[in-house]
Image (cartoon, grey):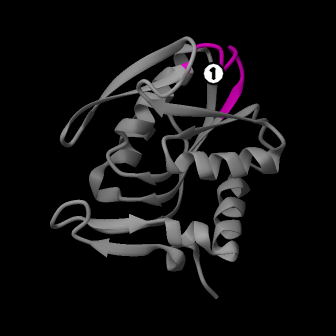
Amino acid sequence: MKTVKDYIRTIPDFPHEGIMFRDVTTLFADPRGFRMAIDQLLHPYVGVKIDKVVGLEARGFILGGAIAHQLSIGFVPVRKAGKLPGKVISQDYTLEYGQATVELHDDAIQAGEKILVIDDLLATGGTAEAGIKLIERLGGEIVGCGFVIDLPELGGRKRLEALGMDVKALCTFDGL
């Protein structure tokens, strides 16, 4: 019987030499694999009150949208700077190769709403932490952070857990 990890393709030396890129598009393309991932991301939160799902740019939109649909609740994107129309709040964060900024509509989350954060991959945790900070600035209460893949050697889980987050991942891969 296949696991979610079995559907994920590894591409060596992308985008740089020495990187083992974990490609979830093969998971998304397979109806059984995609359904399995959505079901497993939802499972830890059965019976938990969730008002909205926040998906992190960009593959978190695919997963988060499907989860929000399953739960019949709203979906909110956290986008790269300059991609959202209207009033936004911004959060800078550090990448291995520089700085980046993510944004969230300033009216996307109401104070007290219960939020589930979703993305495909947890590496250093920088993007997720920036998204969490945006949600918390609007008064959202994060019930959990779900990822398909965790790269434990990069420390993202520890970083998010240090913020008090409940972190779930469907599978792990060693290395970068």
Is any part of residue 119 visible from this angle? no
Is any part of residue 13 visible from this angle? yes
Task: Tell me the crowding category of disc 1: few under 14, some 14 to 19, or many 20 or more residues within 10 angstroms, Cα based.
Answer: many
Above or below: residue 110 compared with residue 26: above
Main secondary structure of the magenta stretch? loop
Quarter location, residue 27: bottom right
- Near-viewer residue (31 or 124): 31
Q: Is residue 45 magenta?
A: no
User: Residue 103: x, y in percent?
Assistant: 47, 24
Say what amino acid the circle numbered 1 marks.
Answer: Gly
- Residue sitting at 68 percent across and 14 percent down? 111
Label tally: 1
- Residue sitting at 41 percent across and 47 percent down? 157
Residue furthest bottom in the image: 1
- Near-viewer residue (27 or 48): 27
User: Residue 124: x, y in percent?
Assistant: 32, 45
Residue under numbered circle 1:
140
- Near-viewer residue (89 or 122): 89
- Residue sitting at 36 percent across and 59 percent down? 151
User: Residue 45: x, y in percent?
Assistant: 72, 48
Quarter of the image with the C terminus is bottom left
Above or below: residue 5 compared with residue 46: below
- Magenta segment: 105-115
Quarter location, residue 102: top left
User: Residue 133: x, y in percent?
Assistant: 46, 23
> Does dot 1 land on a helix, a strand or a loop?
loop
Residue furthest left in the image: 17
In the image, is 84 to the left or to the right of 125?
right
Quarter of the image with the N terminus is bottom right
Above or below: residue 20 compared with residue 38: below
- Residue sitting at 78 percent across and 47 percent down? 69
In the image, is 100 to the left or to the right of 127?
left
